[in-house]
Image: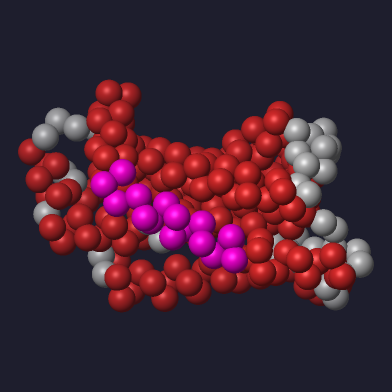
Amino acid sequence: MIRDTWLVFTRQCVLVLRNPVWVFVGIFQPLCFLLLFGPLLDRMPGVGGYEAFVPGLLIQLAMFGSMFVGFALIAELRAGVLERMRVTPVSRLALLLGRCLRDIVSLLVQALILVLIALPFGLDVKITDLALAMAMLALIGLLFSAFSYGVALLVRSEDALAPLLNSLVIPLLLLSGILLPLSLGPGWLQTIAQWNPFSWAVDAARALFAGHPGDPDVWKALVIVGALAVAAATWSAREFARSIR
């Protein structure tokens, strides 16, 4: 399975390298927030600086950058790529893990580019804290990419996949406090946000960028996101196995 995962991963990476523009397209939206929205935070007391804003952008990048990878899988289904896999001995789990690994690597490259661009704006973060934040981003990337692939195998249509994913990701985004801290909102909004696992991830990322790796929010977020990532990967792997028999 490890060999098959590596083969699928390298093939998917070659496809990305042939058209690397998508790596920069994925970072364009958070970069616009960083350059055009970030300077406004200096005039808003109680919001925090770039140590609070950039972690939110990284979580946003992980969510949007990984949620819509299922569209490429639908294109492969239409082209008969997965159909031809039926006659090969390749591990069905590797078909998922290789793609997810490609998505995670692409996500981490985009995240590092965003962090490097934010450094001249005053961002200050320790390497060890940044590495732990990147590990959490990798788990979020695995969660959303596996979920996206699983849903794509179910609906097999871009027209159905797009509104379904948008209907899910927008509430998660707004209830995570990515752009502004949820502490600025009313009590009922904060109560609802407590049930959003990605609000925990945002709080954890901000604690790491503030230099507090021992904050309880960090380990709670890692456990929550890690458990959801394993569940999503398990379900999506079953969908791959069911689709390619």
Query: Is 4 situated above or below 78?
Result: above
Query: Is 11 situated above or below 74?
Result: above
Q: Quadrant of the C terminus?
A: top left
Residue extending furthest toward the front: 120
For image coordinates 33% across by 74% down, the residue present is 160
Viewer-side residue, 55 vs 214: 55
Image position, residue 184 (x, y; %): 86, 70
For image coordinates 87% across by 70% down, the residue present is 43
For image coordinates 50% across by 42% down, the residue present is 109
Viewer-side residue, 94 vs 135: 135
Report the span colored magenta.
17-32
- In-image side of 191 versus 240 (left or right): right
Determine if the magenta segment contains residue 179: no
Q: In which quarter of the image is residue 164?
A: bottom left
Residue 70 visible in the displayed image: yes
Residue 104 visible in the displayed image: no
Query: Is 161 situated above or below 146?
Result: below
Query: Is 156 situated above or below 238?
Result: below
Image position, residue 229 (x, y; %): 52, 44
